[in-house]
Image (cartoon, rainbow, N blue to C red):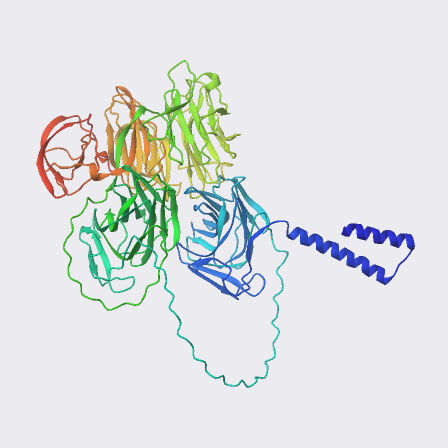
Amino acid sequence: MGYKLIYSFISTFRNKKAFSILSIAILLLSCLLVFNLHTYVSAQSSSTLFSDGFETGDLSSWTGTFGSATVETSNPYQGIYDAKFTAGASSYSVAYKTIQSSPVTYFRQYIELGSLPTAGNYLCLGSIQSGSGNSVDAFVHNVGGQYYWGIVSVINNYYYWDQQSTPSNPQAGVYYCVETCRDVSGGQSELWINGALILNVARSNAGNSNTIYSGLSWAGSAATIYVDDVVANSSYIGVETSPQPTPTPTPTPTPTPTPTPTPTPTPTPSPTPTPTPNPTYLFSDGFETGDFSSWTGTLGNPTVETGHPYDGVYDAKFTAASSYSVAYKTIQSSPVTYFRQYIELGSLPTAGNYLCLGSIQSGSGNSVDAFVHNVNGQYYWGVVSVVNNYYYWDQQSVPSNPQAGVYYFVETCRDVTGGQSELWINGALVVNVARPNSGSSNIIYSGLSWAGSAATIYVDDVMVNVSYVQPISPGPTPTPTPTPTPTPTPTPSPTPTPIYKEANITKPIQASWIANDSTLYAGSFATLYKSLDQGITWQPLITFNSSNPLELDCVFVNKLNYIFASPNESATANNLGLWRSTDSGKTWSQALSLPINCNIWSMAEDSNGNLFAGVYTTGSSTSNARIYRSTNGGTTWLSVYYDSSARHVHCVAVDKSNNYIYASIGDLIGPWNITYVIRSTDGGNTWNKILTGIPQIVAIQTVPGARLLATDSSNDGQIYRTTDDVSFTRVLDTGAQSYGYWIRTNDLNGNIYASFVGGESTTRVAGIYTSNNTGLTWIVYKIFNIHNAYYGSGEASNFVQGTMYYSVLLDSGWQNGTKIYPSSASSNQIVSLANLNLPTNIFYNNYDITLASNSLSTYRPAADFAQSSLSITHWFSLSLGSIAVSTVFSINLFAFRYHKLKES
């Protein structure tokens, strides 16, 4: 309408020749009205979910805060005020706001970095979250002194880290417009810096966003940031045009005071007290009785003392070593149970060990325990959910590094109705996972429900409820009242002890892989199967055609849950190459066509979702060592490395800490006689040979701070370790010719497993070796009885939730595959061999044996020992807790080949 008004005015002017200053003024006023109207309509075209420039001088517009969040006047982007967030290393400092639920949320902040993260660390700069804890956070990352912008998308407890391929190197002391997008409808995560889209990745974000966190949502190193002009919207927000000038306050004259008459006092009636409703708790105890009289009983040797209270006078002290120490309480049965404890760690667990910090249990022994876990000196919070004797270990993807001598608010939730397990630390939800918890909870255990290493903890202010329990502040300390010692109460069975065991699955397998949802995909000869119950039952997905016996040489599942499979060279021409399914195996298409005598042996994925596949060629005249890359989930592929003089790409591996890619090339046979290792530091665009002089390598595994490389040569089977990709050290020598075919790292405890198949000489050995210190030292895990070259275990899956599957080929043919998995020691029988003159590295089938100089001084799981060829019956002294009996065990022992590791 405004445009028509202007046009009418101009027409009148032309027709009537009426021109005056008044006419011009009216024309300009009309234009101004039209453009102001247009601007107003544009500004209102999208729905603002929330905005705050902190000009109230406080955080009153926000729902709440965590950590050190303040409003100040030192560093505003515009206006007078800004928000300041300071966090120590491995901590956070945020203001959070509950917003209207939205499938598409854009979150813009103006952020000034007070300091940059230290080497290797991240600063996460605010978060968009769903009610289930799925989220998108912006971050800046220090990689060797270069700084990268990025985003981390958390989806059902899996972390997708996406960052720039080249550094932007943001500076401290400069404001940046940082805008993230969490798009559930379109399955996207975005990052905009100063109005430029620098990251746009496909991520299957789940659950509408309903909370934003401004500030340091995670600080890997100590940091301070300043934030201004926060906006959350359902569409792109963009940059401010420019900072507005800061208004100068106008002095207000002080009025002359007017004398006020003294009022006559009016009697004030006494207020009527309003009763405060008390929340209904299932149980609570601050130990202020000075004893455990409120509890059903105790296990171990817990005490109540006055040395370390969180508040009040008393706290509970629990001490254990490779054992437990708890107070337990029978509670009203509930399908949803929250269990809060204030816990001070007297000491932290030793390397590779857990401290389980109390338990919520059902009558059938299903449970949820909080834990802290030491992985190579880094400490992670987590929860272990026990469901029908299966252990689900869920921990943070980045360490929080809790400290000894500090109280932490530790709250677990066992939700049977919703199928969830939760862990809250200091009021922040750090783990929230879907777990099929079974049976309503009716008992809680406070203290050390399991101590993998010697430990003492202090506990105060225990509370159990059917809903979330808020943190509290310490109150004044009352004077203690002496309490008589209670009569001891009979105790139930202790909580199960988590260890690792082995079991056979129900099908022979070759190549296999575990998806993020724990679905197992495994090749068994010409057919690819999937199993939803850890290898008990199977569903066939695709069968490849061949004229000769066929096996799958590669099975891989990427972050998007796309499945990839490649049959060996025996497949018919139209079945060769790499095949892909994007719908859990229902339909398949050929993703990469390969010529005859070629297949894929190894695949890897970097943190940006880029895929790499290595080509393995056979035949007397074929030389086609190639590496392909896909940047779109395997839809298209580009050859990024080729060596016409070599036949094999044995292994492709990615170091997720820096996205460096490694590959082992070549073999020492016939006219080829070429072998080397290459590395790419730019996503596969360029490659360089590294580790000059190292023997022929097949398997490569990256571990924290190092790379491990297993040999395939005429010499003894060996593993080499490098920390700089220039020099290398031999850390394992098997002492006989064998070929290192795979190395895998347990995702829960950091233990490493490496397999060597039999070599081609008469002194061949096949076995699996293990290391618990990033590959520095190794021990025998298992020896296979084989007499043929390439027999043993040639293929293995990845580890997911502490579980891995591997193939077994013995002289009698393919055996059913084997899994390593976390289980309970409650069913294991610990046997003393003190009176028997037997070797100290023997596997006794179905029993876990104590073997350390034939004494009870050390306990280790059965899977840690080699196998024996004897078949004997002996009297053993069986020790089960405090019970000691004598019984006869008939032990069927496997073929034994004990092998001593050489010094490196």
Q: Residue at x 60, y 72 (%)?
A: 249
Height in image: 743 above or below 310?
A: above
Q: Position of residue 522 (x, y in %)?
A: 37, 27
Q: Position of residue 696 (x, y in %)?
A: 36, 30
Q: Residue at x 39, y 56 (%)?
A: 89
Q: Quadrant of residue 284?
A: bottom left
Q: Quadrant of residue 883?
A: top left
Q: Residue at x 40, y 72 (%)?
A: 271
In front of the other: 845 or 318: 318
Can the viewer see residue 808 in this picture? no
The quadrant of the image that shows the C terminus is top left
Tag count: 0
Q: Position of residue 760 (x, y in %)?
A: 30, 22
In front of the other: 521 or 734: 521
Q: Is residue 243 left or right of residue 530?
A: right
Q: Position of residue 530 (x, y in %)?
A: 38, 27
Q: Is residue 223 left or right of residue 357?
A: right
Q: Residue at x 33, y 45 (%)?
A: 383
Can the viewer see residue 823 in this picture? yes
Residue extending farthest to the top is 547
In front of the other: 369 or 450: 369
